[in-house]
Amino acid sequence: MMLEWVRQLGRSGIDFFEKLGRGHLFLVKTLAGVPEVLARPRLLIAQLLSVGVLSFMLIAISGLFVGMVLALQGYNTLVDFGAEESLGVVVALSIVRELGPVVTALLFAGRAGSALTAEIGLMKATEQLSGMEMMAVDPLHRVIAPRFLAGVISMPLLAAIFSAVGIWGGYFVGVGLLGVDEGAYWSQMQDKVDFLDDILNGVIKSAVFGVVTTWIAVFEGYDTIPTSEGVSRATTRTVVHSAFAVLGLDFVLTALMFGDS
Amino acid sequence: MKQTKTTEMLVGMFVAAGIAALFVLAMQVSNLSSFTEEGTYTITARFDNIGGLKVRSAVKAAGVLVGRVGSVDFDNDRQVAVVTLHINQRYNRFTDDTSASIFTAGLLGEQYIGLESGGSDEYLVDGSEIDEALTQSAIVLEKLISKFVMDKASGK
């Protein structure tokens, strides 16, 4: 009984590291396919449409509402201290540093990541990937690499759109509805938000999240058990693992970027 | 063929929107537009006590932002604080007997350095120093309170 339990623990440990190793080998092979994709940008453009453009509305609308809620909540707290002029700073810093990259990555994993996993998983289940191999076409180069690259390119752009729309949403609520001074909203924001420290670090964050979520999505799809149940599980795993990875990495990146100041 | 053209169009618009958003963040939200490191000259000032002054704190003259604090250091020999100030190149008419004081914006606000020109004919240039004699330290609330209490006690 006890021995059986220990054996099972060992097996799941080995499985975990096997999968980790497969994932990294997969990433290396995918990256090797990237130059080929750049030589044939048509493949990339088709994927940018489904991964990036179709996520645009979701990201823009979410960003608008996140900014509006931040302005409402921030105003209620700040007005107690007579510091409602600082609303612009509060909204801009929290969106640019944290919420922009993180919320975009979570939405991106749910919207685009799950779709990528399901698509690739079904390709595997219906043996399209094996068919490509039969025709001496490497599916990693032809199918995976364009999707991976599209995700990596889309994420920072989507996060930037999220942040810009969010700050605009905060402006709409704060200045338009709650009567914060327009000049104070923008000038305090410009005074306190640093381009290198805040905006560039936010962009770096979103790029890292883009690599990680897309990697998880395409790998889960490629590594799926080729049955309908397997695809469904892989899709779930994509969303769950992406969320963990994004939130965990966010802590590490924040500690590295903003920890010392 | 029409299909791919629409696709390309949409993707192009998406990428342009992303870059535009980044541009808006850089210009409208951050301080990139208002102040850049180039076009400044550096002077140093020594203070007995800088209070809560930090790197990137504002340097103002007549209430107008003219530069920022570049670094804050401690002079081991003279036991005073050394602050380097990056002043915008446009404002090059501060006399060499300019005084620098540390003020607080609002009651509990951020601290900044205020510059005030004197009557000299010479101007501050890159590398100039403002000595402790011409600087006024930050007001430390504890010192102020203890002084007030002491005065009250001795006055009785």
Image (spheres, rainbow, N blue to C red):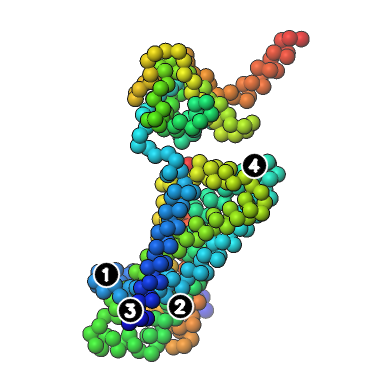
Residue picked out by circle 4: A83
Q: Distance between the residues labelled 1 and 4?
A: 51 Å
Q: Mark 1 lies on which chain?
A: A
Nearer to us: label 2 or label 1: 1
Residue picked out by circle 1: A38
Identify the residue at horizontal 40%, vertical 78% (top origin).
A221
Instruction: Say if residue B87 shows up in the picture.
Output: yes
User: A162 or B84: which is nearer to us?
Assistant: A162
Q: Which amino acid does label 3 sit on?
A: Val
Specify which label sits upstream in the sequence, 2 or 3.
Answer: 2
Residue picked out by circle 2: A115
Image quadrant occupied by the N terminus of chain B: bottom left
User: Is the Cβ of the residue at disc 2 closer than 8 Å to that at disc 4?
Assistant: no
Q: How far apart are marks 3 and 1 (CA)?
A: 13 Å
Specify which label sits upstream in the sequence, 1 or 4.
Answer: 1
Residue picked out by circle 3: A143
Q: How crowded is mark 2: few (under 14 residues within 10 Å), some or many (20 or more)?
A: some
Q: Which amino acid does label 1 sit on?
A: Leu
Q: Mark 3 lies on which chain?
A: A
Specify which label sits upstream in the sequence, 2 or 4.
Answer: 4
Vertical placement of residue B46 versus B37, above or below: above
